[in-house]
Image (cartoon, grey):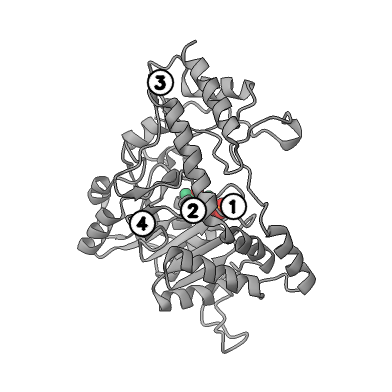
């Protein structure tokens, strides 16, 4: 089965090898008060996980998501792991995740000793397909972990109905969906608990970092204790169970506070970039641009394209042709059930198809309109070759 997916020779371009006008897939925008706040944190001496930026970042993030609690952690992967662990998921349990996502979604399940079960995704939104989740639900299923893939919200209302019917928990993997909405409801408030990532290419960054959001006060308190070696706040060096050191530093949080000050403009810029791409590229034969389901607001973490006949180049040939013109792009993720740790002999057909045809275009909020136009012109020229 694995032969169906050629191993695309994807090479990361090192900073030193890039020509000066090279357009990377993502660069973080750190031109607000990031530098000022980091310097302030350094000068204050509060550089570990106690410090006022940590508290402020958590408060700002909770308010942004419209939830009662936000718990900062050291990255998005441990946010997912901590959420599952705090909910009591472990050996013998099954957690349903989409086949098409970043590997950390499934790894977090694996770390708990539970088994990730892969559901296919929807051909239009590229997010987990509730009908396939229903088919894969068994008496051992404890939770569903939907992903807001490339910034489009997963079908949370349909998943909530399934979760209620089968008594399942919902852990949102919102690592790619800061600010995504269903109606007026924000990503991060759509499940029992949600996990965000602040890696350098995510919509909000702290270098490395993550956040849990939840309306459940007891669950938030449990996550706070577990991220700090399971040490009860009122009894130092006492540990009732095995915890973790998953804390965020005040230096990271200083960057996060500065990012949150202009989150609205970051998201607006991302939506404007997506609209510009869609306007210039839609209608080219063989190219499919991202869809936005009615009632949903995508934040277009990555503006993506599906490349199929009659487009004159394959997806992989298009990536190489763009790179020759100084434009970076990325293939979609491999379906996780095709990777050696999670191999299954029966692939999820939609995930497999998308994985072979999808690519992510440069999507940084730092892109200029002129750069987007240059990229679109390059693709249009290749389309008529
Ligand atoms: C980035 C990402 C993660 C992991 O976040 P890190 O901060 O890199 O650990 C998890 N899930 C998805 C869907 C992601 O895109």
Q: Secondary structure at mark 2?
A: loop
How many other residues sit within 10 Å of disc 3, few (<14), some (14-19) or many (≥20)? some
Measured in 3D between alpha carbons, the distance from the residue under mark 3 to the one under mark 4, in whole angstroms, is 39 Å
221 or 30, nearer to the observer: 30
Is the CB of mark 2 within 8 Å of ligand 1?
yes
Q: First in sequence: mark 1 or mark 2?
A: 2
Q: Earlier in the sequence, mark 3 or mark 2?
A: 2
Label 1 element class: loop
Callout 4 secondary element: strand
Q: Report the Cα–Cα distance between label 2 and label 4.
A: 18 Å
The residue labelled by disc 3 is: 284
Image marks 1 and 2: residues in contact by CB distance under 8 Å: yes
Where is residue 137? Give x, y as percent.
Answer: 25, 54
- Rendered image: mark on residue 95: 4
List the residue tagged with mark 2: 175
Query: Which residue is under mark 1?
Result: 199
- Mark 3 or mark 1: whose residue is earlier in sequence: 1
Query: Residue 155 at x, y = what percent?
Result: 30, 51
284 and 101: which is toward the camera: 284
Pointer 3 or 4: first along the chain: 4
Q: Looking at the image, is mark 1 or mark 4 earlier in the sequence?
A: 4
Distance from disc 3 to disc 2, alpha carbons, whole Å, reads 31 Å
Question: Is residue 77 or residue 33 the one in the foreground?
Answer: 33
Residue 290 or residue 199, whichever sits in front: 290
The span from disc 1 to disc 2 (Cα, nearest Å) is 9 Å
- Mark 3 or 1: in front is 3
Question: With 269 as the anchor, is 247 left or right in this view?
Answer: right
Note whether ligand 1 is within 8 Å of mark 1. yes
Q: Nearer the viewer, mark 2 or mark 4?
A: 2
Residue at image point 45% right, 52% down:
177
């Amino acid at each position: 089965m694995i032969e169906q997916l050629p191993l695309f020779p994807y090479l990361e371009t090192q900073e030193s090898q890039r020509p000066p006008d090279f357009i990377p897939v993502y660069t973080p925008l750190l031109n607000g008060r990031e530098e000022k706040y980091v310097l302030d944190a350094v000068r204050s001496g509060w550089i570990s996980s106690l410090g006022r930026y940590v508290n402020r970042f958590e408060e700002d993030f909770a308010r942004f998501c419209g939830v009662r609690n936000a718990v900062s952690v050291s990255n998005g992967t441990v946010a997912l792991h901590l959420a599952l662990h705090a909910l009591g998921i472990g050996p013998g349990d099954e957690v349903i995740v989409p086949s098409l996502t970043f590997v950390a979604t499934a790894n977090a399940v694996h770390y708990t000793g539970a088994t990730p079960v892969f559901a296919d995704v929807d051909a239009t939104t590229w997010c987990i397909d509730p009908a396939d989740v229903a088919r894969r639900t068994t008496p051992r299923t404890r939770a569903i972990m939907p992903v807001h893939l490339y910034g489009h919200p997963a079908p949370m209302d349909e998943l909530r109905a399934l979760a209620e019917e089968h008594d399942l928990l919902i852990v949102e993997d919102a690592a790619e969906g800061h600010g995504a909405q269903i109606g007026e409801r924000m990503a991060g408030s759509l499940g029992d608990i949600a996990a965000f990532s602040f890696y350098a290419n995510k919509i909000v960054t702290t270098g490395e970092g993550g956040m849990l959001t939840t309306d459940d006060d007891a669950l938030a308190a449990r996550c706070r204790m577990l991220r700090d070696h399971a040490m009860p706040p009122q009894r130092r060096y006492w540990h009732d169970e095995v915890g973790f050191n998953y804390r965020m530093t005040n230096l990271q949080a200083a960057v996060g506070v500065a990012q949150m000050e202009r989150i609205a403009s970051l998201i607006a810029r991302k939506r404007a970039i997506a609209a510009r791409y869609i306007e210039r590229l839609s209608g080219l034969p063989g190219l499919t641009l991202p869809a936005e389901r009615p009632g949903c607001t995508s934040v277009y973490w990555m503006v993506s394209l599906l490349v199929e006949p009659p487009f004159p180049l394959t997806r992989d040939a298009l990536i190489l042709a763009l790179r020759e013109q100084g434009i970076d792009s990325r293939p979609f993720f491999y379906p996780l059930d095709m990777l050696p740790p999670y191999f299954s002999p029966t692939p999820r057909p939609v995930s497999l198809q998308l994985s072979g045809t999808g690519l992510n275009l440069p999507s940084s909020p730092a892109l200029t309109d002129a750069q987007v136009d240059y990229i679109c012109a390059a693709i249009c020229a290749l389309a008529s070759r």
